[in-house]
Image: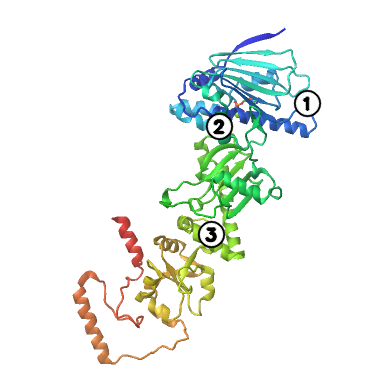
């Protein structure tokens, strides 16, 4: 004897359903993500009960999600062998919008008079999102409690639902049968469903079968203990994630429990991304909450200068229905990002000190983006140990030195780190500014890229040693640095001095106010003259950059 009761939806659910049914939202496919994540939650709970040896209905059932498509009948069915619900639970769980996503969604719509279509996807309105595509939904569930009766819930989403207990026994779990609305027939096509699952639910830890075939084949590796994962598995996952054909340069598998729980699987690719415009690159980490994809390429999780890093982050500590806005402001996300940031730098430092040649390989590929770290206030000390430049110490333009190496080579009396900018090593080496430094045998960093000066300007100093452009090097201070070469310390005769003063005056007259001053200097031996900046001014390279910027 079956006994079906009819109930009106509560006012707030009616409102939600009204918006959902009339929405013109274009990514309706997210309904499947919601249903699969509910199934996965229910399976997690069943697994938990199993682990406590609770006596359960269908104790031996495989924990899985089974989907069947019926293109002809325009139907789709999603079945799980999870924890199931009895009648009271269906009324309580499906009959309210207690859960954060849809309540927040309604508040947002009311508050901002926001266009619901624009924000549906962000909130992921849970079970009811099924009515974006469904004309009718029948939910049949059998609780895991051994003596529970199966229950059937049915609705067209228009105002009421019916619910009845069934007399027959059914296997444990929940089955949701959807009769698709006109125009939504694509969701009864096997290929379409498979593609949606691959996009949104690929890492659900339970097998998902579509018409008997398993669709999600790549496990959520980041959730596995590190010692369980083989290198080939990391590589397979990396290739899947990035479409790269090479294996990653470096893999970071992070598991943190406190103060915030998260797992992350991060990769440094061998090759840098194409950088047409470093300030406008796509980057970020894929954010998962309990294995469900929430957002691709989330930028909150990674500073831009580490944008070459690819990977996923998964946390238990956020609600599945968190909106993008809330991700941006979220304190937990910030904590996760800070932890990731530090771990990446620590790993790079470790490579730099243990495998310097391999680190150089990294630097050659990724330095362009990494140098945007000049705008980074945190971790400056680590960044200083990670930057590399060419220098006069190197044999050719391909050599790289670290600031630490530079400082270790400094002779007694040298306090500052000298640098000079130019298009090429040849151009730099013929610069008169370099003369005195060369003569003194002092190492000079060669900067070939405009950004290099920004980097040194913002890093200011390495330890006690300030970065000083060669053209600003104080000749008196340079003279004080001992060098092997004996200098001629001849004084000028009065007559010679008069000649020089006359020459300076003549030059000053000719150049007029195009120069601040013409003065004699001891810094040059082989060049007759060089241009220098007034003390404390920008280097000439920097002036060129500013000139370009201000044009
Ligand atoms: P949320 O998943 O955020 O709680 P939903 O609207 O997606 O919100 O689902 C509401 C509730 O309905 C869930 O919390 C759960 O208790 C119940 N539920 C939904 N689907 C299932 C299912 N397949 N098996 C068991 N319970 C379910
Ligand atoms: Mg849900």
Residue 486: % across, % down? 43, 89
Disc 2 within 8 angstroms of ligand 2 (CB): no
State left or right for residue 458 relative to residue 219. Answer: left
Nearer the viewer's eye, disc 1 or disc 3? 3
* Quadrant including the N terminus: top right
Mark 1 falls on what kind of element? loop
Label 2: how many residues lie within 10 Å, few (<14), some (14-19) or many (20+)?
some
Q: Can residue 488 be seen in this view?
A: yes
Residue furthest toward the top?
A: 1
CA separation in Å, label 1 and label 3 = 54 Å
Observer-nearest of 288 and 214: 214
User: Residue 193 is drawn in which quadrant?
Assistant: top right
Q: Badge 3 is on which residue?
A: 362
The mark that comes first in sequence, 1 or 3, is 1
Relative to 479, residue 200 above or below: above
User: Residue 519 is drawn in which quadrant?
Assistant: bottom left
Observer-nearest of 218 and 46: 218
Q: Can residue 125 be seen in this view?
A: no
* Quadrant including the C terminus: bottom left
Disc 1 within 8 angstroms of ligand 1 (CB): no
Q: Which mark is residue 56?
A: 1
Nearer the viewer's eye, disc 2 or disc 3? 2
Q: Residue 196 carries which label?
A: 2
Mark 3 falls on what kind of element? helix
Taking the image in four quarters, ligand 1 sits in the one at top right
Number of callouts: 3
CA separation in Å, label 1 and label 2 = 32 Å
Residue drawn at 61 percent across, 49 percent down = 235
């Amino acid at each position: 004897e079956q006994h079906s009761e009819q109930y009106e939806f509560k006012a707030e659910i009616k409102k939600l359903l009204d918006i959902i049914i009339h929405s013109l939202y274009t990514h309706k496919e997210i309904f499947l993500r919601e249903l699969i994540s509910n199934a996965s939650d229910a399976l997690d709970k069943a697994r938990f009960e199993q682990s406590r040896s609770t006596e359960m209905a269908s104790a031996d059932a495989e924990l899985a999600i089974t989907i069947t498509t019926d293109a002809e009948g325009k139907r789709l069915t999603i079945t799980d062998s999870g924890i199931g619900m009895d009648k009271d639970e269906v009324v309580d769980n499906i009959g309210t919008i207690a859960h954060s996503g849809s309540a927040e969604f309604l508040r947002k719509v009311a508050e901002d008079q926001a266009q619901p279509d624009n924000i549906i996807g962000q909130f992921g309105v849970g079970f009811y999102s099924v009515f974006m595509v469904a004309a009718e939904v029948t939910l049949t569930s059998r609780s895991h409690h051994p003596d529970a009766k199966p229950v059937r819930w049915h609705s067209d989403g228009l105002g009421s639902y019916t619910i009845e207990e069934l007399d027959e026994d059914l296997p444990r779990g929940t089955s949701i049968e959807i009769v698709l609305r006109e125009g939504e027939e694509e969701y009864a096509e096997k290929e379409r469903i498979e593609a949606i699952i691959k996009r949104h639910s690929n890492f659900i830890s339970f097998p998902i079968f579509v018409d008997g075939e398993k669709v999600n084949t790549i496990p959520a590796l980041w959730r596995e203990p590190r010692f369980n994962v083989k290198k080939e598995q990391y590589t397979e996952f990396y290739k899947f994630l990035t479409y790269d054909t090479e294996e990653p340069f470096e893999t970071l598998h992070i598991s943190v429990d406190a103060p915030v729980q998260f797992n992350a699987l991060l990769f440094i690719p061998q090759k840098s991304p194409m950088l047409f415009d470093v300030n406008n690159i796509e980057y970020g980490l894929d954010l998962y909450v309990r294995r469900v994809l929430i957002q691709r390429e989330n930028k909150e999780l990674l500073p831009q200068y580490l944008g070459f890093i690819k990977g996923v982050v998964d946390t238990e500590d956020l609600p599945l229905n968190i909106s993008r806005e809330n991700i941006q402001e979220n304190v937990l996300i910030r904590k996760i990002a800070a932890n990731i940031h530090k771990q990446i730098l620590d790993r790079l430092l470790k490579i730099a000190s243990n495998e310097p040649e391999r680190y150089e390989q990294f630097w050659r590929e990724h330095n362009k983006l990494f140098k945007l770290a000049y705008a980074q206030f945190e971790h400056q000390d680590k960044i200083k140990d990670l930057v590399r430049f060419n220098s006069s110490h190197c044999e050719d333009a391909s050599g790289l030195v670290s600031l630490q190496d530079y400082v270790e080579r400094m002779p007694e009396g040298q306090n500052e780190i000298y640098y000079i900018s130019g298009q090429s090593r040849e151009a730099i080496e013929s610069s008169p500014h370099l003369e005195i430094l060369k003569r003194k045998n002092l190492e000079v960093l060669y900067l070939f890229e405009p950004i290099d000066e920004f980097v040194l300007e913002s890093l200011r100093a390495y330890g006690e040693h300030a970065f000083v452009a060669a053209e600003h090097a104080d000749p008196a201070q340079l003279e004080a640095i001992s060098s092997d070469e004996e200098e001629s310390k001849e004084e000028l005769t009065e007559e010679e001095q008069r000649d020089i003063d006359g020459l300076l005056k003549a030059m000053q007259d000719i150049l007029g106010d195009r120069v601040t001053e013409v003065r004699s200097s001891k810094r040059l031996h082989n060049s007759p003259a060089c241009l220098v900046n007034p003390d404390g001014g920008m280097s000439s390279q920097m002036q060129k950059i500013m000139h370009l910027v201000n044009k």
